[in-house]
Image (cartoon, grey):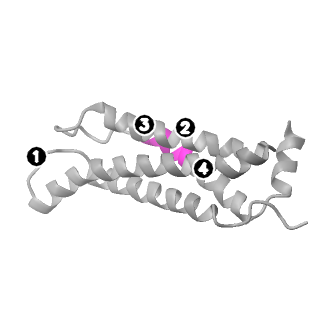
Amino acid sequence: MLNKIKKAYLGSGIGTIIFTASCLLMVIAATVYQIIDFGTLKIIDEGDKTLVFVMFLVGGVIGLFIPLVRIKVVEDILPLAPAAMFAIGFGRMLYLTVYPIADAITNVKWFGGSLQLYLTFLIIYLVGACAVIVSLFFQRKEQE
C-alpha cells in the first residue's frame, strides 16, 4: 500500500501536490472547526455549521484519494467535486461570518458568536478553496 502511495506522488506534477496539500488542510480544518465552540448565533440553527463541516470533510477526503486512482475519467472529472464542495462550504461559512461582523460594526451584541474564530476559519477556507481551484490549472503529471 505504501509503495502505491509513493508511486502515485513520485510521478505527479505540481498541480497534484498543491491539490493534495489543500485537501489535507481542509480535512484538518474541518475537524478542528467541528470541535471548537464558536458561541451560539441566535438566528442560525446547527444545520448551517454541519453543512460547512460536511462539505469540507467530504471534499477533502475525496481530494486525498484522487491521486491514487488511475482511471482517466476519474483523474479528469473528479477533481472538480472537491472544488465545488469547498465553494459551497465557503459560501455558507461567509454567511455565518456576516452575523458576528454585523455585531462588531454596530457594537451591539445581538447575534452572538466569536468574530475572531469565524474570521480565522473563513480565511483558512478561502485559502484552501482558492488553492484547490488554482491547482486544477496546473499539470497533474510530470512530463514523460
The Cα–Cα distance between marks 2 and 4, rounded to whole angstroms, is: 10 Å
Which residue is located at x 59 percent, y 51 percent? 80
Which residue is located at x 48 percent, y 49 percent? 86
Which residues are the magenta region?
26-33
Instruction: Please report contact status of discs 4 and 1: CB closer than 8 Å, yes or no.
Output: no
Instruction: Say which quarter of the image contains residue 131.
Output: bottom right
What residue is disc 4 on? 23
Which residue is located at x 51 percent, y 62 percent? 130
Q: Foreground mark, 3 or 2?
A: 2
The Cα–Cα distance between marks 4 and 1, rounded to whole angstroms, is: 35 Å
What residue is disc 1 on? 110
Q: Foreground mark, 2 or 1?
A: 2
Across and down, in percent, residue 136 comes to 63, 61
Q: Residues within 10 Å of mark 2 (few under 14, many from 20)?
A: some
Q: Earlier in the sequence, mark 4 or mark 1?
A: 4
What residue is disc 2 on? 58
- Screen quadrant of the N terminus: top right
Instruction: Please report contact status of discs 2 and 1: CB closer than 8 Å, yes or no.
Output: no
The Cα–Cα distance between marks 2 and 1, rounded to whole angstroms, is: 33 Å
Q: Is residue 44 left or right of residue 24?
A: left
Q: Residues within 10 Å of mark 1 (few under 14, many from 20)?
A: some
**Secondary structure of the magenta portion, mostly?**
helix
The Cα–Cα distance between marks 3 and 2, rounded to whole angstroms, is: 13 Å
Q: Earlier in the sequence, mark 2 or mark 1?
A: 2
Q: Which mark is residue 132?
A: none
Amino acid bearing label 4: Cys
Amino acid bearing label 3: Gln
Amino acid bearing label 2: Val
Camera-nearest residue between 16 and 29: 16
Q: Earlier in the sequence, mark 2 or mark 4?
A: 4
Q: Foreground mark, 4 or 1?
A: 4
Q: Earlier in the sequence, mark 4 or mark 3?
A: 4
